[in-house]
Amino acid sequence: MVNIKKILCAVDFSGMSSQVAAYAQVLARCLNAEVDVVFVASTLERYRNFDVPAASFQNLADTIASESEKMMGKFIQENFSIPNVRGKILKGYADEELLGFARKENIDLIILGTHGKKKVDKVFFGSVAEKVIKASEIPVLTIRPK
């Protein structure tokens, strides 16, 4: 029997994230499941070969980290009305961090959008959704933009 008690809701705070959250909330309500809303902040390591001073990268990384904490609280407040929702900010490559979190936290289902706000990144680095789907050991529900 399928037993879904922990859902990972991956967000990037784009408009698509609200659609992903809506599905996570409906499923969590129906299944009496917990939801971990997860945002992965890039460590900017992938851009190290760009001709930009290291201090600029560090300032940007620090800003992303502090702003993402604020955005997470606001996002959960605006998109969830159910109990048992936690926000988590991770740092690194999105696909690796999401899959690692899912394993560590014994997640039963991953929900994520197929299109985020970083369309340029897809050209250079590939789709996070595609990488998660290919490597995940648990079910992944993908949400296409409306």
Image (tube, grey):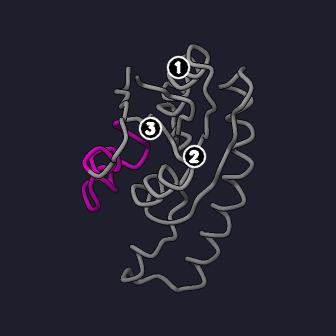
For numbered disc 3, what is the local secondary structure? strand
Amino acid type at circle 3 is Ile
Does residue 2 appear left or right of residue 25 in this picture? left
In which quadrant is the C terminus drawn?
Answer: top left
**Which residue is nearer to you in this view: 35 or 127?**
35
Task: Give the mark, 1 or 2, whose residue is nearer the N terminus.
Answer: 1
Q: How many marks?
A: 3
Residue that numbered label 3 is attached to: 110
Q: Residue at x 41, y 60 (%)?
A: 96
Numbered range of the magenta stretch: 114-134
Q: Please identify the dominant SS of the magenta region.
A: helix
Q: Residues within 10 Å of mark 3 (few under 14, many from 20)?
A: many
In which quadrant is the N terminus drawn?
Answer: top left
Q: Residues within 10 Å of mark 1 (few under 14, many from 20)?
A: some
Q: Residues within 10 Å of mark 2 (few under 14, many from 20)?
A: many
User: Quadrant location of residue 25?
Assistant: top right
Q: Is residue 117 magenta?
A: yes
Residue 58 badge: none
Find residue 6 and report its horizontal and vertical position in percent.
56, 35
Q: Residue at x 72, y 60 (%)?
A: 66
Q: Residue at x 72, y 31 (%)?
A: 84
Say if 13 sits above or below 143 in the image: below
**Which residue is nearer to you in this view: 12 or 101?**
101
Find residue 86 and report its horizontal and vertical position in percent.
70, 40
Amino acid type at circle 1 is Leu
Amino acid type at circle 2 is Val
